[in-house]
Image (cartoon, rainbow, N blue to C red):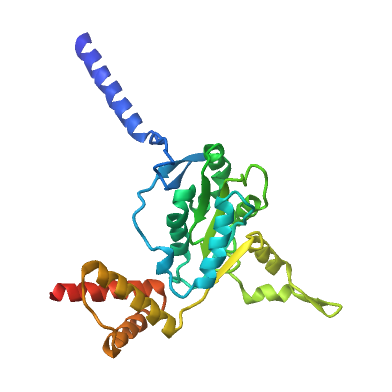
Amino acid sequence: MSDISTADFMQRVVAFLDRYERNLPPVPPVIDWSQTPAARWVGQGDGGWLKPLEVTAGHGLGDLVGVDRQKALLEANTEQFVKGLPANNALLWGARGTGKSSLVRALLAAWSDQGLRLIEIDKGDLVHLPALVTQIADQPWRFLLFCDDLAFEADDSAYKTLKTVLDGSVEATPDNLLLYATSNRRHLLPEQRSDNLGASMVDGELHPGEAIEEKIALSDRFGVWVSFYPFSQEHYLEVVRHWLTAMAAEHGLEWEWGEQLQKEAIRWAQARGNRNGRCAWQFARSWVGRELLKK
């Protein structure tokens, strides 16, 4: 009986250890940044680890049509950063689907061979920035910390953490790290009409209320603002033609721009209620796919 009890006990121990090991956090990989252009921060407890990302060929700077001013602003700031010169954190804000995220990723493709690396991070994980800095502080690479679709609700206190991050403490902003964020909101927080009730006139000058000052204070901490606006129909059709040209060439498809195709592209945008680069890219994929299917 004692032998059976011992065997049963050992089985239970093994089963317990198996369950325990399954619940252990994954062992963080050691990243070879010479072979890894991008990673994602995975928050864990009070810290986290960097997960390498498989980077595929995406939109290049030449694919971003009609946003030359925005490209020039961010390219200049990024070049300064890559070359070890003073540069600013950047906020890309504006209408959805207009190329904000694509521009940041295109910058990685353009500058990765000169030492630029990208780290994606969620808004909620910005509190882990000191832990992240510890992992990259001694690296010779230049890191863009990319926070996509950054926005806060009125009762979200996490924006105070971001303000601290952007204030420029020694620990939070090492020389080899810069923050690029995208948002649909200019001031990252919802703006209510009631915010204006606190405004006052002092000696003929308009002084914003505390609510507005608090909201502006966060976005002011980004040294570079890059604004993106809804596409006009002409701009939208220009982007459609760009993607049709690129995709048709990739698949050896002969095509010709004409009134009928233009009307199709316009109807596609109207059905979705917007005109932007994402919509143009999706239309081109759909049309080229249908034409190839016919053949």
Quarter of the figure that contains the C terminus: bottom left
The answer to whether one can see residue 45 in this image is no
The answer to whether one can see residue 223 in this image is yes
x 48%, y 78%: residue: 230
Which residue is farthest bottom? Answer: 259
- Residue 234 % position (x, y): 42, 84
Residue 228 in the figure: left or right of residue 198: left
Residue 37 in the figure: left or right of residue 241: right
254 or 145: nearer the viewer: 254
Position above or below: 274 against 150: below
- Residue 248 % position (x, y): 25, 72
182 or 86: nearer the viewer: 86
Count of all numbered marks drawn on residues in the image: 0
207 or 20: nearer the viewer: 207
Examine the image and state in which quarter residue 62 appears. Answer: bottom left
Which residue is farthest left? Answer: 295
Examine the image and state in which quarter residue 236 appears. Answer: bottom left
- Residue 285 % position (x, y): 28, 71
x 20%, y 75%: residue: 290
Quarter of the figure that contains the N terminus: top left
Residue 194 in the figure: left or right of residue 112: right
Position above or below: 253 against 143: below
Which residue is farthest right? Answer: 203
- Residue 182 % position (x, y): 51, 62
Position above or below: 200 against 131: below
x 68%, y 62%: residue: 217
